[in-house]
Amino acid sequence: MRTRDRMNASVRGSTGPWGPAHRPRCRAGTHGHSDPSPAPTSDIMCSPFRGSRSFLPEDCQELLLPSPTPMAYIPTPSAAGVAPMGSQYCVCKVELSVSGQNLLDRDVTSKSDPFCVLFTENNGRWMEYDRTETAINNLNPAFSKKFVLDYHFEEVQKLKFALFDQDKSSTQLDEHDFLGHFSCSLGTIVSSKKITRPLVLLNDKPAGKGMITIAAQELSDNRVITLSLAGRKLDKKDLFGKSDPFLEFYKPGDDGKWMLVHRTEVIKYTLDPVWKPFTVPLVSLCDGDLEKPIQVMCYDYDNDGGHDFIGEFQTSVLQMSEARDGVPLELECINPKKQRKKKSYRNSGVIILRSCKIHRDYSFLDYILGGCQLMFTVGIDFTASNGNPLDPSSLHYINPMGTNEYLSAIWAVGQIIQDYDSDKMFPALGFGAQLPPDWKVSHEFAINFNPTNPFCSGVDGIAQAYSACLPHIRFYGPTNFSPIVNHVARFAAQATQQQTATQYFILLIITDGVISDMEETRHAVVQASKLPMSIIIVGVGNADFAAMEFLDGDSRRLRSHTGEEAARDIVQFVPFREFRNAAKETLAKAVLAELPQQVVQYFKHKNLAPTNSEPA
């Protein structure tokens, strides 16, 4: 239902009913090993860090950036590494599989325990993106953990793969021995599909005979499969105990060899293990082909890396799909050597597939292409601390180039967001100013002074309305955020009735100073965290923005003054001063960095599929 004509009340006060219209969604375009012997066990297992303390060379400081990821042996959430994206950036996702050959041996009494760290370049700096698990006692690892990146045709996406020998339980890379690195662009890998290159040290000298192999696969299929497995009466392999079983899943590679897809955790001291359910992309497990053979290997874990083979079997997703909750599928685990030697041999235990579920793991791009509209609202600070807009020292002073920090922020965010709204009509609100004719302070007014239609046509319309209103208002105060946050939240609350992912609301607040109504704003943000809504705050000028950092719950979950915790982090704060000399695209990416993840997080939590989604 079109609702622009519903806004017929005065908006001069702080509780006017006008705001983002409930607009209809756009019609978005759609844009093996051949013998029965066990697979090599050289690429084994996630394990707690061990060994003596060691350090990277001093010239390796470019790699020693703060790590946003957990320890190497802990899988990183799929949300990690989400890159900023606009409509022109979203193309597809690419999965990178990494393996190493003939790595340097840094351990004295055993072999190296390597893990791989992926760095991406951001504004000329290498930033850690993700890590693999650690392969114990292994110079030829094939890592189970994959790197998943957004691939943008129009960008040169520089990557650095660095390998380290894990030496102790620390997330700091300077605590581990450096084994070599390799740098290239994502396009180089994608165009070749698979590359093998020598590793080099930081002085560009060869890292011994060390090599790295990287294979790329497009994740165009968003289906994922969740498997729940257990074992029964597996062979006993330990002399003074039982077994410590784990499973490895392989699929046939293009070169005819089996390729490791997934490795379960180790279950200690049991012949009847129950593994945690795990989820992998269907394209990773079987290239999306439900009939493609899958080789499953069962091993008994040993600390020295020489894991004992228990048994194996072949299956397919089609066969595994027969397993349902309450109707398990049992698969015999066979050791071919024992089978050949003993006529009475039956099996080496049974692997029980308790359940197999296939569903779609929707991405930000899936929701956008499915018709989700991003409902954009701008809130502008007109408090007296900004200075007289006629004074060149004022933050609202429009320079001879026709811009200022407020306009720069509006352009940086709006030019990308407007691509996701079919009619590109955006409400623009002001706060902290006295309005004619009675000069009362308002914390929620239309900057185009049209109480029945506060919408501006595109980013150009917002900029024009902003420039036009400056001579007609008096800058005052205080700096209250909660009225505008609550205003947008009222319309986001209406969207909670949606049956599919059709609307998501974004409030951009541009401000120069400290929030006056912090308790009310904290409460408003906590309540908004339950809604399809995100808040972007751009701080202009050189004020102390500690309060804004507090609202941005990256390091801790925000709580209201009553103690209620935010359902999720919906605030992204960026100080404009850090981007004054940078390209506008840089500010846009920083401001919108968390938005795709926030959109996906909300719709997944509410179990809302894209409007035009297909069943799994």
Image (cartoon, helix red, strand yellow):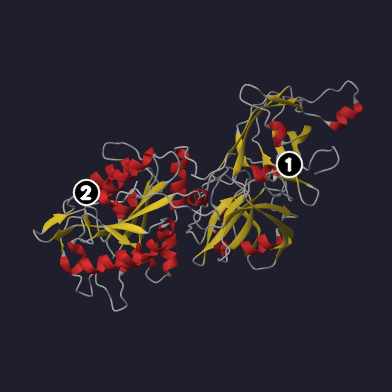
Q: Nearer the viewer, residue 74 or 442?
A: 442
Residue 153: image quadrant is bottom right
Q: Which residue is mark 2?
A: 517
Q: Nearer the viewer, residue 419 or 198?
A: 419
| x and y, in percent, of residue 595 in the image | 43, 52
Could you say which disc has been placed on residue 435 in the image? none
Q: Nearer the viewer, residue 263 or 308?
A: 263
Q: Amino acid at mark 1?
A: Tyr
Q: Residues within 10 Å of mark 1 (few under 14, many from 20)?
A: many
Label 2: element kind: loop
| x and y, in percent, of residue 458 in the image | 35, 63
Q: Amino acid at mark 2?
A: Asp
Residue 124 falls left or right of residue 193: left
Q: Which residue is mark 1?
A: 250
Label 1: element kind: strand
The reply to whether residue 55 is in sight is: no
